[in-house]
Amino acid sequence: MLQKTGRGLLTLLLFVMGWTRPGLSSPLRPICDLRVLDHFIKEARDAEVAMKSCREGCSLSESVSVPQTTVDFDVWEKKNGLDQAHEVQSGLWLLQQALGLLRTSVTNTALHSHLDNSIRNLLSINAVLHSLNIQEYTPPASAAELEGTWRVSSATDLLQVHVNFLRGKVRLLLMDAQACQQDVS
């Protein structure tokens, strides 16, 4: 009886392993639900509010490059998806660098968790882009090599750029992602 049960379990295990193929990499399912981005935007706003209420130990040690957040919709629509993705990815990279610098210069421990969360969320957005089959981004040697940037010198300005970039260009890219388009036939 035990031998029959053992063979049955082994058969079931082999069936499940063959069905799930744990050793083989499978493509990521696209993450198309904009509520994920909405959650990141809410947390970015929370960090911005916390920074605005901070009175001590919450300054940026030097000015940083950030992405332009304004969107000319006619120009954006004329860009191909690869150029749009590159613009968003370079902006996410700039924000990651800037928030990392802010994190090291802020001494207010209450802000540390907000900034850590913001940096983690940017990494998560990159994972979302990867799930949408958007090509991996290779950052330049320095931010000076990027077009469409400007410099901010205050922490509140940096966090405002962060929120606006997510609400603008990141949202536009995710809304129009090819992997998320439903076949309407």
Image (cartoon, rainbow, N blue to C red):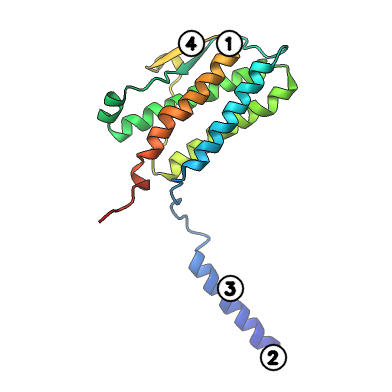
Residue 1: mark? 2
Which of the two marks, 3 or 4, is nearer to us in this view? 4
Pick whichever of labels 1 and 3 is earlier in the sequence.
Answer: 3
Report, in whole angstroms, how far the alpha carbon at label 3 lies from the one at label 4. 57 Å
In the displayed structure, does residue 152 sit left or right of residue 9?
left
Going by the numbered disc 3, the residue's amino acid type is: Leu
Report, in whole angstroms, how far the alpha carbon at label 2 lies from the one at label 1. 73 Å
Residue ID at (50%, 20%)? 161
Q: Secondary structure at mark 3?
A: helix
Question: Where, by quadrant of the figure, is residue 86 drawn?
Answer: top left
Q: Secondary structure at mark 4?
A: strand
Report, in whole angstroms, how far the alpha carbon at label 4 lies from the one at label 1. 10 Å
Going by the numbered disc 1, the residue's amino acid type is: Ser
> Which residue bears the numbered disc 3?
13
Going by the numbered disc 4, the residue's amino acid type is: Arg
> Which residue bears the numbered disc 4?
151
Pick whichever of labels 3 and 4 is earlier in the sequence.
Answer: 3
In the displayed structure, does residue 166 sit left or right of residue 81?
right
Which of the two marks, 4 or 2, is nearer to us in this view? 4
Farthest residue in the bottom direction? 1
Residue ID at (63%, 32%)? 117
Residue 102 visible in image: yes
Q: Secondary structure at mark 1?
A: loop
Report, in whole angstroms, how far the alpha carbon at label 3 lies from the one at label 2. 18 Å
